Amino acid sequence: MPHFIMSVELNELKLFRKRDWIVYLLLFVLIGVTVYTGMAASKGTIVRVSVNGQMRYRFSLDQEGQHVIECNGKKLMELLIADSDAKIIHSACPLHLCERGTLKQSGALVCVPQKVIIVLEQNGEAVEISDEYDLITG
Amino acid sequence: MVEEKKSLSATARLTFLSALTALAISIGVIESLVPPPVPVAGFKWGFSNSVMLMILLLLGRKEALTAAWVKVMVASLITGRFLSPSFFLGLGGSLSSVYLMSILMKRKFGLIAVSVCGSFISNLVQLLLAASLFVGSVKIFYLAGYLISIGAFTGLLNAIIAYGGLKWLKTIGMLS
Amino acid sequence: MHKMSSGNQNQNMKLSKSSQLLILIFVTLLLLFSVFFFFRSQPQYCSKVDIALGTTVKVVISSQKDPSLILEAILREFHRIDQKFSVTNEKSMIWRINHSANPVQVDEETAFVIERSIALARATEGAFDPALGNLISLWGFDRISDAQFQPAIPSDAQIQAALEKSGYEHIRLENDVVVLENGIQLDLGGVVKGYAIDRGISIAKEMDPNATGYINAGRDIGIIGPKFGGDYWSIAVQDPRGESGEYIDLVYLKKGTIVTSGDYERFFIIDGVRYHHIINPKTGYPVRETISTTVISPDAMDADALSTAAFVLGSEFSAMLLPVLGGQGLFVDAKQVVMASEGWSFFKEKQ
């Protein structure tokens, strides 16, 4: 029964013992597994672009560069993907309000006059905007 | 065979238990002021486990479990989180941690390994409880990897603290 | 070498054993409960995003009944309200009222919205005013979401003329008949989003009283039900001068609505000067003293009108007025000083 009697036990108290290796091995494996699944999960992040309610484009965050978004032959805007994030540039709308902020910052990029909605999707589910809060008003 | 009565007297045991439990409570309360490592309600860091370990080594499993109960009760009452998510997570985490650590100590594992396992099981139980009772989403398990690393780190620190703490008590002659 | 101390040991051992067993049972039960509850816990959240009322509408719902049906119903309602209360759509009720020489017979819903708007205008002494159609149209903020919008600054004379044809006191509503006097024009843009949010929440509750989630219409939020059935939704308040996503405050709501008016939402810049959509009903020009107001209220329609009114009235006065009208608010003035009404801090804690 675990009734340690100090004067003795203290001398036997060791930080490391031979059998510890089992624990460290398990730990190593566990960390490896979770990191791997974590990486696999984030690879699936997709940028979804819908125009007028219709899903038109899907890009992976790896597809860096400028992508043209058009509808019925008319160029609406360009989507710039870089550093695992995206933003709208060269939009044909009058006030360019949609060019503010990036996709990860705002949670979604929207151009109201041109009816374009751009969101992030991961394994079919919408991605959380922020881990500090659920929603932002304003 | 001569039986050397080298164990601590009952009074000394009680005193140590009280003092160390109070210390654990203080650490627990301070911990809840610091933001949790994970964006989940009521999640605990686990540094009070270093004191739990000390109680376990010094006084035994029963005392350590008692201390764990008391610590969680009092800390949650002080912070006004009695019966809140953090109460249940704290309870699950502390009790399972102490229990596992006592088993591993008996089986003569090294202190660091014991402490790391203690932190690990504490985080694991908190994760399971949070997932089932409070969060209701699989997404929380994506935090698992992050959590394991945190657990290993705090485990290491706790072991060093407990070891140092006991050695220090011995040196200043409190354990005779 | 292990040394036993005394006979006490045996007794302690026995206690140890039973408390060990107790702990073991407790932990097992805990784990069993966890697994059990895990599979019974609330279903996942579904969301849908659409454009209506000149802004992005995102609905997030969790329901035991088919959530996509509820999502569709809410968004349909938003489109219906958009059509019915639009100022620019010729088929809308508001267009009819604005362009009719004769009294117009309206339906219950329109009467309700107009009556409520008048009441809110009275309560805020005109700071919120549903009859500023001429002014808003002059500045162009009714067409700001159109692809062909051209920003321009009206002249002083034009603004004076529009001011004379403004004011809720010239709305006559009796027995569901509406008459607009003095050439005023209705523009319900200041409450219509809030009204739609309230309607959306009612529809969700009708279809499933236990549904949880929220409606986010252009960052005006109405809560359908608490997060995962019991938890608070944490809502940040956008920093009016910060990057999108940066916030100045954080509140926790399980129910109710929160609406923000800002000078950064609908605006255009000409010669380095910002002209935004919240017009001072007395001067005819965009309000300069306030840059952002946020209101929490049980009804989104109230919150919507109150946040507009607070913008016009200024931080200090609004901080006192709002609680009287059933709302709590956070205000940022032009000097970026943040002020809150007394009850606002209630929402900063998870009670």
Image: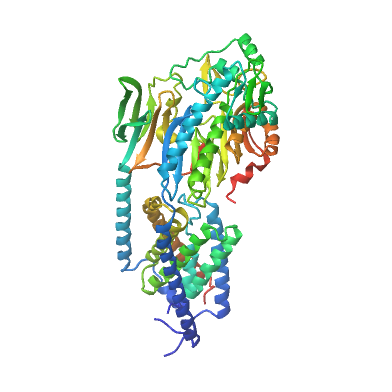
Q: Left or right: where does residue C26 sit relative to residue C153?
A: left
- Residue C150 at x, y percent in the picture: 48, 14
Q: Left or right: where does residue B174 sit relative to residue A113?
A: right
Q: Please tell me which residue lies in front, B110 or B94.
A: B94
Q: Is residue C247 visible?
A: no
Q: Please tell me which residue lies in front, B116 or C338.
A: C338
Going 42% across and 74% down the picture, which residue do you hit?
A11
Furthest residue in direction bottom, as rendered: B1
Q: Quadrant location of residue C2? A: bottom left
Q: Left or right: where does residue A122 sit relative to residue C33?
A: left
- Residue C334 at x, y percent in the picture: 62, 26
Q: Quadrant location of residue C75? A: top left
**Looking at the figure, which quarter contains the N terminus of chain B?**
bottom left
Q: Quadrant location of residue C347? A: top right
**B136 in relation to B118, above or below:** above
Going 36% across and 73% down the picture, which residue do you hit?
B107
Q: Is residue C132 visible?
A: yes
- Residue A112 at x, y percent in the picture: 44, 26
- Residue B88 at x, y percent in the picture: 50, 61
**C221 in relation to C285, above or below:** below
Q: Please tell me which residue lies in front, A34 or C72.
A: C72
Going 39% across and 69% down the picture, which residue do you hit?
A14
Going 51% across and 45% down the picture, which residue do you hit?
C205
Q: How is the image coloured?
A: rainbow
| Label total for image | 0
